Amino acid sequence: MGQFGSHLKLLGKMTLKNKSSLFWVFVYPLLLVTMMSIAFRGAGMKLQPIPVAAEQGFYYTVFLENIDMLDLTVMDSHEAEKALREGKVAGYFRADGVLIIREDSSESRILGEIGDELKRAAAAGRQGINPDFSTQYVSIAEQEADLLFDILSMTVAMFTLYAYFSGIGMIDLLQANLSPLAARLSTTPLSRLSFLTAGTLINTCLSFLEMILVALYLKFIWGINFLSDLPRTLLLFLAACFFGVAVGLFVGSSNKLSTKAKIPLGISIMLVLGAFGGMMGAELRLYLDRHLPWLNRGNPVNLIGRLLYRLNALSSTREYTAGILILVFGALVLSLSSLLFLQRRQFKSL
Amino acid sequence: MSTFRAYLALLRKYWLIILAFTSIFLILVFAQGGRAADEDKSFSRGHMNAAVSIPAGGHGAGEAFALWLEQAGHAVKILAFSQEEAQEAVFLHQYDAVFLFEPGLTAPQAVSDRTSGQGYFALSVAETYFRYLDAFQGQGRPYDPQAFHSVLAEKAEVLFQESGRGRTVDGVRVAFFSALGYVLLLMSLTLVPLVNQAFFEAGVRSRSNLSPYPPRLRAVAILLGSGLIVFGTAAVLFLATLPISMTLFSPGQAGGILLNLSIFSLAVLALSYLVSSLIRNKVAITAVSTVLSLGMAFLSGAFVPQSMLGQTALGIGRCFPLYYFIHANYRVNTVGAMAGDLLIQLGFAAGYFLAALLAARLARRARRQFLWGN
Amino acid sequence: MAICEMRGVVKHYKQVTALNKFDMEVREGEILGLLGPNGSGKTTAINCLLGLLKYDGGEITVLDQAPASRDPGLKRRIGLVPSDLAYFEELSVIDNISYFAGLYETNKREQKRMTGYAVDFAGLGKYRKFPAKKLSGGLKRRLNIACGIVHSPEFLVLDEPTLALDAQSRKYVLNGVRELNRQGTTVLYTTHYLEEAQELCDRIVIIDEGHNMATGTLPELIGLIDAEESVHIELPCGEKEAELLERVRSLDGVVDLFAHNGRVTVKLAPPGHHLAALIESLRLWDIAYSTISSELPTLNEVFLSLTGKALRE
């Protein structure tokens, strides 16, 4: 217990006294989710009633009045033209049934579909076919496409992997060629296994604590609930933070880049992985899903984010156990590999 | 010139950051793809992106529906989904709707977000199909598939009002240049303060002040170096991706795009210079550049169209030059349409430069007081 | 008994040979100085013998083991005070020292005792709670030393521990090193300050361009070169200057002689010291002097003679 206790105390104190570390671990995630919540709140393609005009004498005015999605006004052609030019209506139906629009938009496309429907009804009527407009043929299972939740899931997932930086920091203290302090520590009877274990424990816990803080902040300040399935989500956070530390240990120990290079590299990689997962909008992820599906399969941000929204937005535990096992097993493999890399004690230059 | 040479030497040290951020941009660009701008002025009817889930043994009605959707110009994928999978696919915007066909049932269950335009559209298309199918198959007459399909193919005449446009927005072009704007901001806000900071180290500054090298000349050289970073980055990002981006705009729009980019670069230079005047700590520089650039990007509509952002976000976004850069990209057809946005960006540039000069003057005064006071 | 031996050690970097068949032996109980200009290979030699650097040829043993040994027992017996400050900046003085104590000793009481000892040794009693980064330059160096000696090592390596220190702090450090040596610690002390080496070290190794140029006590090293002794005689009001010059010129072993403003400098050939003899001669000649002093060859002259360049170049 001796050295392990010293290391726990040391690393805990160092993290709490290091302002830079505190910023990236505790402050930055809260700042980013605040900005994103402001940005995407009220965003999306929520349909509002479409303002439309019908020229006096349009045969199907009554039909249009019965469509809830439309905000219909009957006016003469001159007024309708003016209203369209000024953007007060998305389109108007002329008396002869022609739809006039100003621009190609989702609203005008819906109006176009309604116009087509009128034509169909007329064509069917001519053939003596009377479709039943009072029956609903297609049963609907509502599923909200929540852009904000989707993006935040990936962002929160990215944050769990920010424990990467603490992993890098630990290696900075263990490899003699990375810092004078590491060189000194290499000459002491310091147990690397004990140091790494203590460091992994402390940093995983701190990161985990931070994730709980972010989740609580989102829930109580922004009303976005990532704790619907509390026990599973907490376990996911823990596994993900552990994985993040392990990635940092592996990247830190496996190459010759300096710490100064590894940090911006880590930031860039996290941003890219987050973008691939949909943190910067669904388009990129959709593109990858369609054309390069293998790319996101190995993306840990995508894996964690997917489990997060499944648990909390879709109430689904699909692939949960497999996901946790992948994260934990992956973390163990990476940690052990980094321990192997750290067996190297001598360097060609310091 | 020696200051400028030193500036370039310091800049070379950050090659890894330059490479990393350029890679981010290239990845974002690659994902946007080289979809050509659509100049067609005819009305394009709505198209859905749908999945039709058919059980393993097949489903006649489902297959017929999928075939009809495809012929009608919609994007259709036939697969086997559970309800859970369908819900996830809709949640993630993979599909506008997923139609689940079960054995023994003619009509599907549709999983969709009815509150969205595309979801509503998809549901109404499906409802229409099955309504008319029921009408043609029932009512005591033999089913005539040809008549059925010809009725479904009926289209209303849709015309544009005079001077209306087929596509007011080329979403892909705007998204492309928004990504460029974000990466330009990120790189400049990181590199300019980092390199400038080396010249403002206490020892270096004192030594420089004691030398006969004119301080104004030194300041100009540093500004030139900063300008090189910003405008150089803009030029490299633009030229490196020109094979893709040139498919997104017409020759007539090129002038507007370049003007907008140049003025935005000026605003970015001024902002970077202000940040470098205020913040001298390397760790703080990285933190500020990341938070500022990402925050601006989210709130200005760099990742999601401005039309999709909430009012609060747009209100805050209007405090940043990136918002006006993106806003102008929607209007690149004429300089006149962009004029307001360009002028505002110039205003930001002037404001940031003045603030930077003021910050530098206050810092100099504080240093003199400290020295004389001691 | 040799605590540490380096025989024919070779170390290449890409374009530079840092150690070129370098030999060195540190005997038990001594303070061995490793003296050389910047870039001569001192730190490389230390890093090789501590097992931090791979070397390309030769043999090294430290306390009868290979330096790269992972034996914690070996590490407990060695202490390092590197030239770069190597402690945790975020922690306080006491936290730093007690952490390093914890690496060598598991017993809490013993750790506390070791920590107290190191704090007192380094004179950091008043600064126990200070964050390390807020200490002055001299105190930082002392903290650096305290972290290296907390476990009372058998063999202590100090790599330029007085770099950038004022005279008072430097004296403090040198006294501390002497005290450690008195308590039984063998010390390898690298420096490029010849006064420190002269004052502190029992033996000195002169290193240049990765070679061991010479090893020995100070008199032995001085004896290697044909350097002259300089005797300075100040005459009151310049009296009898001409007579003195004439008489001294006639003495054996006078290599050079010059006078300026009543101050006469006589350069006498080695070996040995000639001051006493000259004083006696002055007495016999009845020539009064206000001051007389002797300047023996320094290490700088030794170094210059051996390498063709001054130590401070």
Image (cartoon, coloured by chain):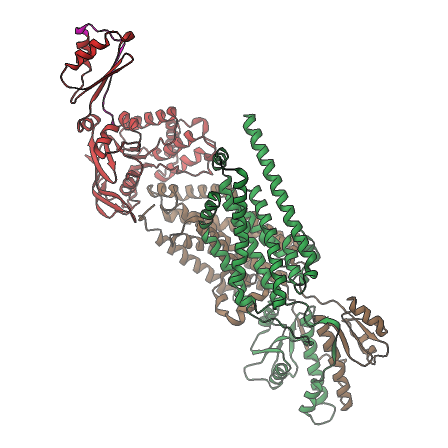
Q: Which chain is red?
A: C
Q: Give yes or no for residue C214 being in the magenta stretch.
A: no
Task: Answer whether residue B160 is visible to the viewer in this image.
Answer: yes
Residue C256, horizontal then vertical, whole percent: 20, 20
Q: Residue furthest left?
A: C252
Q: Residue A43 appears in which quarter of the rendering?
A: bottom right
Q: Residue furthest top?
A: C286
Residue A280, horizontal then vertical, whole percent: 58, 60
Up/down of A324 relative to A78, above or below: above
Quadrant of image for the C terminus of chain B: top right
Q: Which chain is green?
A: B
Q: Nearer the viewer, residue C300 or B293?
A: C300
Q: Is residue A57 left or right of residue A296?
A: right
Q: Which chain is brown?
A: A
Task: Answer whether residue A209 is visible to the viewer in this image.
Answer: no
Q: Residue C249 appears in which quarter of the rendering?
A: top left
Up/down of C136 relative to B274, above or below: above
Residue A138, horizontal then vertical, whole percent: 68, 78
> Which stretch is magenta?
C283-299
